[in-house]
Image (cartoon, rainbow, N blue to C red):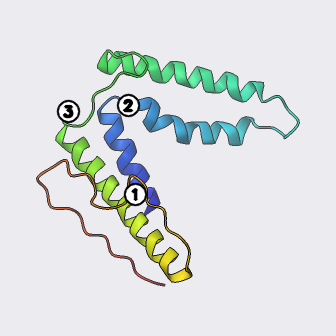
Amino acid sequence: MKLIAQALEMHSRAICGQIEESFSPPIHEELWKHYDLNENSSNDLYFEKRKKVEEHLLAVKDIIWGYGPGASKGVGYDPTADLGYEMYKIILSKFEEEDEQACIKEGRKYSGNVHTGTPLKLTNTPFIKIESHDE
C-alpha cells in the first residue's frame, strides 16, 4: 500500500511540474546506494552526482513547464493529478487510522497529524475504499 501511495504522489506531482518533489527522493536514495562508499569517505562523489541530477531535473522542468526552482502548478491544474493526489491522501489517512487503532490496542498515546480525520477532497469522484486484510 505504501508503494501505491508513493506512486500516486509522484504521478500527481509530476503532472503539475513538481519534479523535484517527485523524483528527487528515490533518485537520492539510489545515488546514496551507489556513491556512499563507506562511513569514512567524504561522500563528495555523492553530492557531486546529486547536484548534477538536480540541475538536469530543473532543466526538464524548464523545458516542459517553463518554470524555475520552486515554481509549479498545483491543485486544480489537472483532473488526473487531482484524483491521484486525493487517492494518495486517502491512503495516508488509512495509515493514520491503523496507527490510531494500534495505539489504542497497545495502550499508547496517539498523536494525530495532518492525515488524521477526513482526507482532502479534490474531485467529484467518490472516495476510494481501502480494506485491510489481516494475514
In screen coordinates, is 81 left or right of 34?
left
Image quarter of the N terminus: bottom left
**Could you tell me the amino acid type at mark 2?**
Gln
Residue 128 in percent (x, y) is at: 23, 64
Label 3: which residue? 77
As helix, strand or loop, the secondary structure at mark 3 comes to: loop
Q: Give the residue number, with chain letter if any, for mark 1.
A: 4
Instruction: Tell me if residue 45 comes above or below residue 118 in the rendering.
Output: above
- Vertical placement of 103 versus 10: above or below? below
- Residue identifier under label 2: 18
Q: Quadrant of residue 118?
A: bottom left
Instruction: Specify the amino acid type for callout 3.
Output: Tyr
The residue positioned 84% from the left and 40% from the top of the image is: 38
Quarter occupied by residue 5: bottom left
Task: Specify the farthest residue to the right.
Answer: 40
The Cα atoms of the two marked residues, 1 and 2, are separated by 18 Å
Tag 2's secondary structure?
Answer: loop
Which residue lies most toward the front here? 109
- Give how far apart the Cα atoms at labels 1 and 3 are: 22 Å
Amino acid at the residue labelled 1: Ile
For this rendering, which residue is in front, 24 or 90? Answer: 90
Judge from the rendering whether residue 95 lies leftward or rightward of residue 128; answer left or right.
right
Q: Which numbered mark, 1 or 2, is in the foreground of this view?
A: 2
Q: Is residue 63 left or right of residue 55?
A: left
